Amino acid sequence: MKRGKRPGSPKTGGRKKGSKNKRTRELLEKAEAGGQSAIDYMLEVMRDNKNDTGLRLDAAKAVAPYLHAKRAPEDAGGNTVPPMIYIHPDLEEPE
């Protein structure tokens, strides 16, 4: 990577961060042209009573993580349990 004239100066030129390449732009345009997102399609399949029950259940399972958050872990008393953080002891001998 070419840097500026002085050491430690930021990179100059090139593509801006977050810009989309041709392939990503084409995929986004195709998705927008259809007018329906994958989530909307799965919800439509799930709600259609004419579809097979198994198909409707599969659609519900697939779309659920996008619509409903997971519950936090709870102990036997129903209290939310904070996440455990394990800190590994230093394996190097002190000098």
Image (cartoon, grey):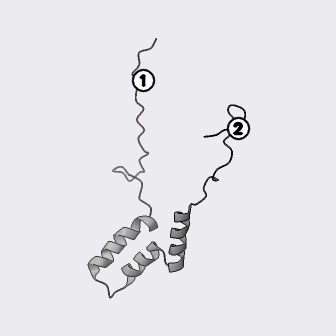
Which of the 4 quarters of the picture holds residue 69?
Answer: bottom left
Residue, x 44% and y 45% (percent of image)? Answer: 82
Which of the 4 quarters of the picture holds residue 19?
Answer: bottom right
Residue, x 45% and y 73% (percent of image)? Answer: 39
Query: Is 44 placed above or below 95 here?
Result: below
Q: Which is more N-terminal, label 2 or label 1?
A: 2
Q: Position of residue 62 (x, y in %)?
A: 37, 69
Q: Position of residue 40 (x, y in %)?
A: 46, 76
Measure the alpha-carbon separation of dots 1 and 2. 40 Å
Kindly identify which residue carries mark 2: 4
Q: Secondary structure at mark 2?
A: loop
The answer to whether residue 35 shows anywhere in this view is no
Q: Which mark is residue 90?
A: 1
Dot in front, 1 or 2: 2
Apparent side of residue 77 relative to residue 24 in the rendered image (left or right): left
Q: Position of residue 75 (x, y in %)?
A: 36, 49
Dot 2, how many residues are within 10 Å of its Cα: few (below 14), some (14-19), or many (20+)? Answer: few
